[in-house]
């Protein structure tokens, strides 16, 4: 079975995906987008789709944002190193745990300053999700579109959530997937994605890890790692695609299916471009700031007009994941066997928080990392 699964990784690239992600110079028609990308579960990057947004010129100026949101209380995510919704050493065991960021309500001008001028002891990231753009940042809504018209027509629905991401180069996103169709528009700076199709699920070495959370003390400026009580487990990818050079050989031996298999698709999404990221695709994200010292993006999550739990794509993914693959550690688990199917990413029959135990839902919509979401940072 292992050989057949590995053959699938190559064949899906040869037959449908090719070797690079398609770039479109102008927005597609709804029919073209549906036929060539959505129906094929194939990502693409679209230029000149948001060139009319005032945000492209306005948001690169920090003073504009600070003035427009001068009295807005926003959810600022804090970590000691920019690694949240990621795997870190367990505080009391010789193993790993899945950690989420500390979330601190903060006035926007103060949050923006922490992002643009990061102190040595913490990394700040605005990545609340949960439809945060239409709730926490509603003063900015006139600066960009409420949805992407040609995409909404092709998908047959308006976005379930629109999220704003503001971060710096210190934050990055570990490998994860979403059950949602994702249109990711970069407004300032650049986002650097590593992408793997759903057929490569075995290469992610998904295991369940105990959930934990950072707790930050403003008094002493220190973080404490707290394991959740009662104990809860999150299925998460074990692979770090960018290990330190000194540990690359060791990581390659631990995760041979990833490091010895087909290379992930590597794309950079620049300001003014939109990435279509199909549901179920695994993605790892880094970012580079723009002129204003931040990376800023808006993303639109859609369910494509139906519940993913009953979609053939979801059924196919669960079937593929249930197949045995000899190089996978015995602790790797099919996500469909978990109480929360996708761990921090919402079970498809309701929009749970993208990251388990994360911020409270807004209007009962909880879509997280993203990341940028999150936190998976996207």
Image: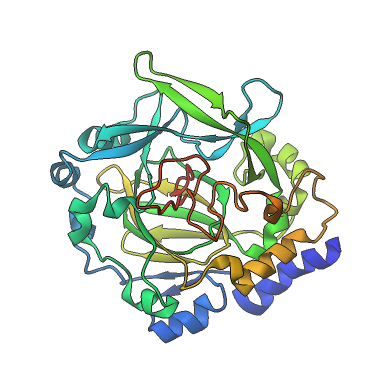
- Residue 231 in the image, given as x and y percentages of width and height: 63, 32
Is residue 18 at all visible to an observer of this figure? no
The quarter of the image holding the N terminus is bottom right
- Residue 367 in the image, given as x and y percentages of width and height: 44, 53
In the displayed orientation, state which residue is furthest to the top: 220
Q: Does residue 277 sit above or below 356 in this rendering? A: below
Query: Residue 296 versus residue 111: which sits nearer the camera?
Result: 111
Color scheme of the displayed model: rainbow
Residue at 24% over, 62% down: 144
Residue at 21% over, 69% down: 52
Q: Is residue 110 left or right of residue 245?
A: left
- Residue 119 in the image, given as x and y percentages of width and height: 34, 25
Residue at 57% over, 30% down: 228
Q: Is residue 48 left or right of residue 323?
A: left
- Residue 145 in the image, given as x and y percentages of width and height: 25, 66
Q: Is residue 248 left or right of residue 108?
A: right
Location of residue 245 by image quarter: top right
Q: Does residue 332 sit above or below 96 in this rendering? A: below
In the displayed orientation, state which residue is furthest to the bottom: 31
Query: Residue 71 versus residue 94: which sits nearer the camera?
Result: 71
Query: Residue 177 versus residue 130: which sits nearer the camera?
Result: 130
Q: Does residue 93 sit above or below 45 in this rendering? A: above
Is residue 323 at all visible to an observer of this figure? yes
Location of residue 312 by image quarter: bottom right
Q: How many marks?
A: 0
Residue at 38% over, 53% down: 190
Location of residue 153 by image quarter: bottom left
């Amino acid at each position: 079975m292992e050989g057949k699964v590995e053959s699938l990784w190559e064949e899906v690239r040869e037959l449908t995906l090719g070797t690079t992600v398609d770039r479109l110079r102008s927005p597609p028609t709804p029919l073209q987008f549906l036929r060539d990308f959505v129906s094929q579960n194939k990502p693409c990057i679209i230029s000149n789709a948001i060139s009319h947004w005032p945000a492209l010129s306005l948001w690169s100026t920090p003073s504009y944002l600070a003035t427009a949101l001068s009295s807005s209380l926003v959810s600022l995510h804090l970590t000691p190193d920019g690694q949240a919704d990621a795997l870190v050493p367990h505080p009391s065991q010789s193993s790993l745990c899945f950690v989420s960021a500390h979330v601190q309500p903060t006035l926007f001008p103060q949050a923006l300053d922490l992002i643009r001028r990061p102190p040595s002891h913490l990394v700040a990231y605005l990545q609340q999700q949960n439809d945060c753009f239409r709730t926490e940042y509603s003063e900015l809504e006139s600066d960009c579109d409420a949805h992407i018209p040609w995409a909404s027509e092709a998908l047959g629905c308006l976005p379930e959530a629109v999220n704003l991401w503001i971060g710096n180069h210190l934050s990055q996103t570990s490998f994860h997937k979403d059950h949602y169709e994702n249109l990711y528009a970069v407004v300032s700076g650049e986002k650097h994605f590593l992408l793997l199709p759903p057929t490569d699920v075995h290469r992610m070495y998904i295991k369940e890890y105990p959930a934990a959370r950072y707790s930050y003390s403003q008094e002493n400026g220190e973080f404490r790692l707290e394991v959740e009580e009662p104990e809860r487990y999150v299925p998460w990818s074990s692979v770090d695609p960018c290990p330190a050079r000194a540990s690359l050989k060791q990581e390659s031996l631990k995760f041979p299916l990833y490091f010895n298999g087909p290379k992930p698709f590597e794309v950079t999404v620049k300001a003014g471009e939109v990435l279509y990221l199909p549901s179920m695709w695994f993605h790892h994200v880094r970012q580079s700031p723009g002129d204003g010292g931040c990376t800023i993006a808006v993303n639109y999550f859609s369910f494509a007009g139906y519940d993913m739990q009953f979609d053939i794509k979801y059924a196919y993914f669960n079937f593929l994941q249930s197949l045995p693959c000899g190089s996978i550690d015995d602790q790797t688990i099919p996500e469909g066997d978990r109480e929360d199917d996708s761990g921090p990413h919402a079970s498809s029959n309701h929009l749970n928080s993208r990251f388990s135990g994360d911020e409270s839902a807004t209007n009962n919509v909880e879509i997280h990392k993203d990341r940028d979401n999150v936190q998976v940072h996207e």
